[in-house]
Each structure stands twice: as C-alpha cells, then as structure tokens.
Image (cartoon, helix red, strand yellow):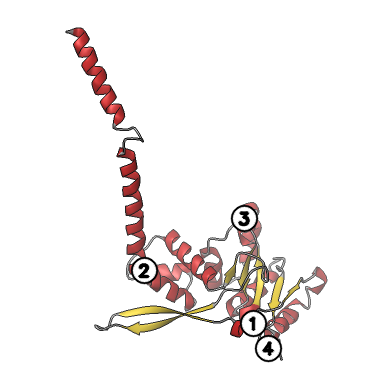
C-alpha cells in the first residue's frame, strides 16, 4: 500500500513537472498569448493615438505637450518612442552621419475626412530634391570662432536648405556620462525648448538633428552656455545650387 502511494505520488509529481515542460506546449502557449497581447496592445495604441502623436509632433508639440493634448491617455515612454521614430522616419533625425546613406524621403501627412466625418491622416511621400542626392560639406566651429559663431552659424543656415542642414548632437552621451554638465547646458533654454530636448529619448551615441528653426534657436542658446557646438553638415539644396 505504501509503495502504491509512493508511485502514485511520483506520478503526480511527474504530471506536475510536465505542466511546466517547455516541450509540452504549455509555456509555448503562454508565449504565443504574450505575442498576441503585445500585438493587440500595439494595434489599439496606433488606432487611438499613433496618428495623432505624429501629427502633433509635426506641428511642433513637445512630448510633454502631446501627452497633455491626447484624448486617449498614453504612457509617456510610448509617446517618446513614437515621436522619436517619427522624427527618424521623416529625416528630422539621422542615426548615421549625413551623406553616408540615402537620404530620407520627405514625408508629410494630409488630413482627410471619411464618409461620416471621421478625420484620418494619410501619409504622402515626395521625392528628395527631384531624385538628386545632396553633396554634403562638413563644418567644424573652432573655439576661436566663439565670438563670431552666431553670425557665422546663421549665415550658413540661411545659405542652405533646411532639409539638407544638420548638426551632430551628443545629448545622450552627456546625459549618461556628464549629467551635471548637461543640466548646465540646458539652463539657457526657455521651458518649451528644454521640454523638447528632455522629451526625446536620446540614444547613447552621436545623433544628427535637422537644423530647422527650432533647432537653430536651441543651438545658439546652448552654445552661450558652454555647449561645444557639434559638427554642422550642409548639403546642396535649392539655395546652394544657385
């Protein structure tokens, strides 16, 4: 009798172990369910907030402002991730040095109205300078240029198209290695400029940001607060071709 109970107990133990055996499908089922939940979560987020986040980012809203503006609440980190990807997809951010890969196409979003008045955004892509690749020039400002930097910087930006003007940014590296220095550099920015920089999830490497009007103003103010201006890249645009 005792032996029978022992065998029965061992059988129960084996059965219990098999429930957690990765080769029996139970855990595999959990993984599949996890993938399904993640996919569903991503679909719901995209349907509820994805297009709105990208549209607001195009209008110049910071991550903080977008979070406050959304009708359907979304996690701050998810908004950061969406904005970062959108800026990279539209060429506002480059993860590689300008000129080392084909440029991003110019992407815009057109507002459309459905049958029942529902608003949607359709992505429109147009060729980059009629298919011509820009010829890039790299410019490094020296310490001796500090006094004349604002006028030189503005002059070069005005002489080149915004779409082919970039500056290298080490914000992710500074934030990781020298957070106090990074905080000092940000002191000269107004609240909205500071929110823009802090709101982006900068990677721990050099990233290249398009020199649009917002970034030009930020660069000028940061350089006044001892930030070493990154390398500037200017490609041949309509202005440069004249």
**Where residue 132 is drawn, which disc sits there?**
1
Where is 197 relative to 215, above or below?
A: above
Q: Residue at x 55, y 77 (%)?
A: 105
Q: Earlier in the sequence, mark 4 or mark 1?
A: 1
**Measured Cα–Cα span from mark 4 to mark 1:** 14 Å
Q: Is residue 215 above or below residue 84?
A: below
Give the foreground label among 1 and 3: 1
The crowding category of the residue bearing disc 3, from other C-alpha atoms within 10 Å (few below 14, some 14 to 19, many at least 20), is: some
- Tell me the CA gap for discs 2 and 3: 32 Å
| Alpha carbons under labels 3 and 4: distance apart | 39 Å
Residue at x 35%, y 78% (from the top left corner) = 120
The quarter in which the N terminus is drawn is top left
Residue 239: image tag: 4
Q: Is residue 108 left or right of residue 33?
A: right
SS for callout 1: loop
Label 2: element kind: helix
| Secondary structure type for disc 4 | loop
User: Mark number for residue 179?
Assistant: 3
Mark 1 or 3, nearer chain start: 1
> Depth check: 39 or 193 in front?
39
Q: Residues within 10 Å of mark 1 (few under 14, many from 20)?
A: few
Label 4 CA crowd tier, 10 Å (few <14, some 14–19, many 20+): few
Query: According to the image, label 2 marks what residue?
Result: 49
Whether residues under marks 1 and 2 lie with C-beta atoms below 8 angstroms apart, the answer is: no
Residue 108 location, x and y as percent? Answer: 48, 80
């Amino acid at each position: 009798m005792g032996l029978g109970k022992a065998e029965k107990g061992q059988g129960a133990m084996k059965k219990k172990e098999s429930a957690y055996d990765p080769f029996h499908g139970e855990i595999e089922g959990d993984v599949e369910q996890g993938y399904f939940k993640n996919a569903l979560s991503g679909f719901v987020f995209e349907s509820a907030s994805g297009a709105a986040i990208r549209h607001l980012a195009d209008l110049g809203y910071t991550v903080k402002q977008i979070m406050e503006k959304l009708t359907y609440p979304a996690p701050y980190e998810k908004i950061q991730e969406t904005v970062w990807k959108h800026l990279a997809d539209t060429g506002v951010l480059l993860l590689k040095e300008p000129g080392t890969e084909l440029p991003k196409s110019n992407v815009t979003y057109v507002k459309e109205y459905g049958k029942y008045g529902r608003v949607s955004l359709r992505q429109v892509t147009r060729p980059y300078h009629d298919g011509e690749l820009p010829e890039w020039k790299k410019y490094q400002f020296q310490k001796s240029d500090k006094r004349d930097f604002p006028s030189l910087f503005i002059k070069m930006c005005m002489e080149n198209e915004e779409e082919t003007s970039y500056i290298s940014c080490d914000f992710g590296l500074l934030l990781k290695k020298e957070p106090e220095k990074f905080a000092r550099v940000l002191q000269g920015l107004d609240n909205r400029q500071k929110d823009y920089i802090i709101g982006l999830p900068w990677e721990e490497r050099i990233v290249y940001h398009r020199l649009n009007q917002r970034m030009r103003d930020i660069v000028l103010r940061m350089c006044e607060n001892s930030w070493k201006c990154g390398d500037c890249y200017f490609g041949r645009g309509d202005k440069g071709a004249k």
